[in-house]
Structures are given as structure tokens and as C-alpha cells.
Image (cartoon, grey):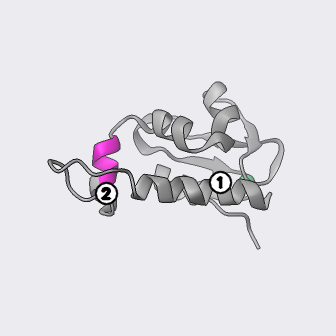
Amino acid sequence: MAEKCKTIRRAATAVAILPQDKHRPPLFDIKALKKRIGSRWLDVHEALAPSLTDALRNPGEHVPCPVQGGDDGFRFFDDVEVTGGGICNTCGPRSDGIALLQLSPAS
Ligand SMILES: [Zn+2]
């Protein structure tokens, strides 16, 4: 469980430190980052969050939570391509891809 959490935090850090294109705004600006990602959140999750593989392979379906496991507590939002968000019955909603990548287990 802690290893999965660590993976997601590492993924979020990777998003923040991607090499910058001199023609684009700094990636540490979250609004700019979201704009740059646009409607490619599934690609971002696939590249940076292996723990979301079940959800990526079963769009619209309930799958095990990437943090807590279980049977079917997690699903992406219907507009995940644009928002990157999802919801877990236990962990709660993550409104966008940044929040989902930062998902950490309840204490
Ligand atoms: Zn969860």
C-alpha cells in the first residue's frame, strides 16, 4: 500500500519536472500544466501511474482502488480524458489528474 502511494507521488513529481520546452510556460504552473495536457489525461496516467492500469484498461468500470486495493471501489470520471479525475468510494473524489496523481491513503 505504501509502495503504491510512493509510486503515485513519484509520478506527480515526474509531471512537475518534465523537461521544459522554451516555447511553453513553466511546468510548475499547474494551470499551464493542465492546459498543456489538455484532453490527454489518459496518456499521462498511463505513462506516469502504473497503479491506474486497471482503470485504464476498463474505462467506465469500477476497479480496485490504486491505493487501497479492494474489488471495485475506484473509477475514472466520465470526462477523465479532460479532467484526469476519478473517485474512490473510500478515498473520495479527486477532481483532476493532479489530485489523482497525488492520491494518498487515509491515515
Ligand atoms: Zn481508495
Picture residue at 49% right of the left edge, 59% below the top: 13
Residue 40: image x %, image y %? 40, 34
Q: Are marks 2 and 1 in contact (CB under 8 Å)?
A: no
Which mark, by number, is residue 27? Answer: 2
Q: Which residue is mark 1?
A: 7
- Residue type at mark 2 is Leu
Distance of label 2 from label 1 (alpha carbons)? 20 Å
19 vs 44, left or right, is left
Residue 11: image x %, image y %? 55, 52
Q: Quadrant of residue 5?
A: bottom right
Quarter placement of the C terminus:
bottom right
Tell me: residue 62, above or below residue 88.
above
- Residue type at mark 1 is Thr
Q: Main secondary structure of the magenta part?
A: helix
Quarter placement of the N terminus:
bottom right
Disc 1 packing (10 Å; few <14; some 14–19; many ≥20): some
Decide if residue 96 is in sight here: no
Residue 106 included in the magenta stretch of the image = no
Q: Secondary structure at mark 1?
A: helix
Decide if residue 32 is in sight here: yes
Residue 84: image x %, image y %? 48, 44
Picture residue at 45% right of the left edge, 39% below the top: 41
Q: Which residues are magenta?
A: 33-37
Quadrant location, ligand no. 1: bottom right
Which mark, by number, is residue 60? Answer: none
Sequence-wise, the earlier of marks 2 and 1 is 1
Picture residue at 38% right of the left edge, 51% below the top: 18
